[in-house]
Amino acid sequence: MHFSASAGLGLNLGRRTYFPSSSDDFVNRVYRRPNLVEPGLSTSSSMSNSPRCQAQGCNADLSDAKHYHRRHKVCEFHSKAATVIAAGLTQRFCQQCSRFHLLSEFDNGKRSCRKRLADHNRRRRKTQQQTQENQNY
Ligand SMILES: [Zn+2]
Ligand SMILES: [Zn+2]
């Protein structure tokens, strides 16, 4: 399952620029860099070509990191850290959602957000269809 990165936190991270300058500029960008988006990588972020850890002050170059870390823009260290400052907020990398959540989403010490764990347990208990709930932020 994959949550849209454009909800919640994503807004703070992938700041989209709508080419405020001339349309010439727009054309140049489009034609010069047709492969801006890697296949399989559907983030809206266009900040840099080499993936970097989102954690504040880390900026680890993930070019040599595992695919997983590159894809989610988090270094190995910060994907396991109890707290990470990202986008100016204290967060933790959720191993279920593969993205950062606020600490309030986690039970103490857990690496998966409460919501996912609850989901998981619920599904395990009764195999009824439990349609995915949308994030509530
Ligand atoms: Zn990092
Ligand atoms: Zn989560």
Image (spheres, grey):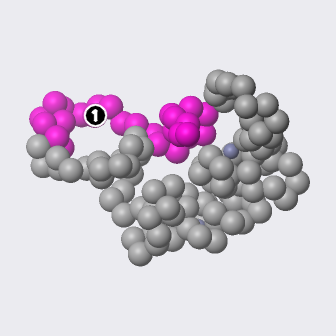
Q: Position of residue 12 (x, y in %)?
A: 55, 40
Look at the numbered disc 1 and give the secondary structure of its residue: loop
- Residue at 72%, 25% (x, y): give it: 128
Q: Assign ligand 1 to one image quadrant.
A: bottom right
Question: In this orientation, which residue lies closer to the viewer: 73 or 59?
Answer: 73
Q: Position of residue 6 (x, y in %)?
A: 51, 34
On-image quarter of the C terminus = top right
**Residue found at the far front of this picture:** 127
Q: Which residues are magenta?
A: 1-30
Asked if one can make out residue 23 in the rendered structure from this viewpoint, the answer is: yes
In the rendered image, the vertical position of residue 118 relative to residue 92, given as above or below: above
Q: Position of residue 13 (x, y in %)?
A: 52, 45
In the rendered image, the vertical position of residue 132 relative to residue 25, given as above or below: above
On-image quarter of the N terminus = top right
Magenta-drawn stretch contains 4 = yes
In the rendered image, the vertical position of residue 89 relative to residue 24, given as above or below: below
Badge 1 is on which residue? 19
Q: Is residue 52 left or right of residue 78?
A: left
Q: Is residue 104 left or right of residue 80?
A: right
